[in-house]
């Protein structure tokens, strides 16, 4: 049986009321999974549709906490402007269990289950439009987003990745039963998540990461897999974005098939349009566009069918 797109986790009886309604602002929400405390941050905008607001799940990268990461992206400020609810979960340790770390895969936290539990928990605290649930991540957060969508494509209306694709093993096994729109942004001089795929390159990159991660699939191969899986065979339609960016777009029979891939020539392991200082070791940050705004505009174009 083919899964329904944007099927809710732990579906409740239609018309059931929310157990709580959190006020506007930032809240630390308790959550326990498999005996482990896994709280998350929920940012509620001052004005949101009473019958259900869009919901964005933001996954930080390895070695950075969700609050600092949000300073890079500015998603919470955009949430207040655009009226969507933002969730900011935390990895249990230094890294998300994205499929690249053998010891984590065997003995580590159930991060896919954690994100499912978060979605289930959040819908009882705030009014969420289940047709408009989105996932965005950078670096290790991007590869974690890939694993989640590959395993549960029915849960999101679209997802976005910056500076990350997917673990090779995850990519090989990824055969979503339903199409999911994808937005990917990647720099060609990213030493931590190489554009061509593989492992982090260079002594400096390996020293910064400390614990080696398994290889990722290259951007072009990742694009091909989603184009084929989504049946987005109309394309690529290419466009340049001066001074250093370009974008390829593929379309299919429905908007759910969309695949959009941004390339930053000479770009590093950074978030284009970053709002906070980033150590030079991560490379050059593009100012050709704002990845936060691009991601939200992409999300706003994609809603699951009722």
Image (spheres, rainbow, N blue to C red):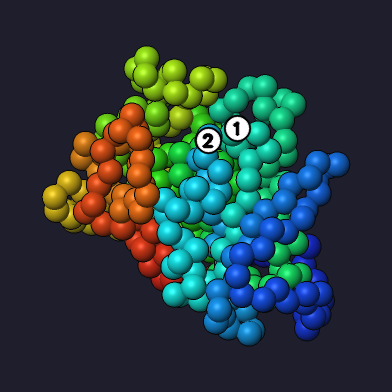
The residue sitting at the top extreme is 203
Left or right of 57 in this view: 30:
right
User: Where does residue 73 sit, x and y in percent of width and height?
Assistant: 42, 54
Between 68 and 254, the residue placed more toward the observer is 68
* Vertical relation: 58 (above or below) 43: above
Q: Are marks 1 and 2 in contact (CB under 8 Å)?
A: yes
Between 16 and 306, the residue placed more toward the observer is 16
Residue 85 sits in quarter:
bottom right
Q: Residue at image x 44%, y 75%? A: 81
Residue 216 at least partly seen: yes
Q: Name the residue under label 1.
A: 94
Mark 2 secondary-structure assignment? loop
The residue sitting at the right extreme is 35
Q: Name the residue under label 2.
A: 62
Residue 1 at least partly seen: no
Quadrant location of the C terminus in the rendered image: bottom right
Marks 1 and 2, how far apart at CA: 6 Å
* Neighbours of disc 2 within 10 Å: few (<14), some (14-19), many (20+): some
Q: Residue at image x 77%, y 53%? A: 31
């Amino acid at each position: 049986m083919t899964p329904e797109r944007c099927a809710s986790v732990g579906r409740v009886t239609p018309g059931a009321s929310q157990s709580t309604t959190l006020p506007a602002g930032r809240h630390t929400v308790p959550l326990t999974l498999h005996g482990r405390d896994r709280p998350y941050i929920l940012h509620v905008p001052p004005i949101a549709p009473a019958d259900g607001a869009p919901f964005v799940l933001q996954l930080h990268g390895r070695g950075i906490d969700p609050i600092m990461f949000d300073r890079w992206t500015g998603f919470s400020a955009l949430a207040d402007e655009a009226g969507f609810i933002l969730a900011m979960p935390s990895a249990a340790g230094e890294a998300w269990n994205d499929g690249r770390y053998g010891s984590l895969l065997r003995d580590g936290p159930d991060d896919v289950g954690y994100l499912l539990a978060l979605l289930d928990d959040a819908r009882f605290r705030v009014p969420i439009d289940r047709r408009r649930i989105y996932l965005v991540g950078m670096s290790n957060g991007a590869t974690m987003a890939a694993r989640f969508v590959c395993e549960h494509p029915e849960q999101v209306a679209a997802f976005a990745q910056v500076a990350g694709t997917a673990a090779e093993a995850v990519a090989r096994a990824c055969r979503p039963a339903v199409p999911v729109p994808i937005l990917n942004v990647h720099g060609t001089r990213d030493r931590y998540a190489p554009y061509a795929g593989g492992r982090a390159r260079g002594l400096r990159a390996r020293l910064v990461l400390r614990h080696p991660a398994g290889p990722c699939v290259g951007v072009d191969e990742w694009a091909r897999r989603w184009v084929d899986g989504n049946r987005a065979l109309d394309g690529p339609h290419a466009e340049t974005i001066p001074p250093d960016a370009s974008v390829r777009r593929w379309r299919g029979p429905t908007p759910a098939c969309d695949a959009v891939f941004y390339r930053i020539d000479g770009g590093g392991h950074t978030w284009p349009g970053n709002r906070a200082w980033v150590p030079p070791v991560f490379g050059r940050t593009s100012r050709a566009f704002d990845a936060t705004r691009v991601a939200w505009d992409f999300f706003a174009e994609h809603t699951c069918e009722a």
